[in-house]
Amino acid sequence: MGKDFLELERDHVARSRALHKDGGAPMEAFRGLVKAAGTDGALGHKQKELIALAIGIAIRCEGCIVFHTRACLKLGVTRAELLEMIGVAVEMGGGPSSIYGAEALACYDQMAAAA
């Protein structure tokens, strides 16, 4: 069996909550940045989450993939949109991004099936 992305999500969320709870002013500032960056502007929140997930794939960040895949699902990203974004991430990140793009697709499929 492949990775259990739902379990990874639970683990990442729990660790992230602990860090944000005890991380003081730097983590409060980071949360403010996340909120501000995700606000609709010239780009909508959905587009911004697709960009964030593409970057997560390109830099090979498992936690980024889990968090931003969940956000993309909540914002109504379709599997077709996800696959197009993965293509762009692979273009920009090369071979390693194809591995993490496959991870993002598996994560999306697992989360969508559980929803």
Image: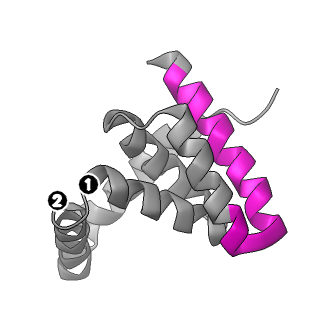
The residue stretch that appears in magenta: 90-112
Amino acid type of the residue that numbered disc 1 sits on in the rendered structure: His
Left or right side of 5 for 35: left
Left or right side of 30 for 52: right
Q: CA distance from mark 2 to mark 1?
A: 5 Å
Residue at horizontal 40%, vertical 43%?
A: 72
Q: Is 73 one of the magenta-colored residues?
A: no
Numbered disc 1: secondary structure? helix
The percent coordinates of residue 99 (x first, y second) are 79, 55
Q: Is 95 one of the magenta-colored residues?
A: yes
Q: Nearer the viewer, residue 8 or 100?
A: 100
Q: Which residue is mark 1?
A: 45
Q: In which quadrant will I find the C terminus?
A: top left
Compare marks 2 and 1 and give the one earlier in the sequence: 2
The percent coordinates of residue 112 (x first, y second) are 51, 24
Residue 3: image tag: none
Q: In which quadrant will I find the N terminus?
A: top right
Residue at horizontal 56%, vertical 36%?
A: 80
Above or below 114: residue 10: below
**Circles 2 and 1 in contact, beta carbons < 8 Å:** yes
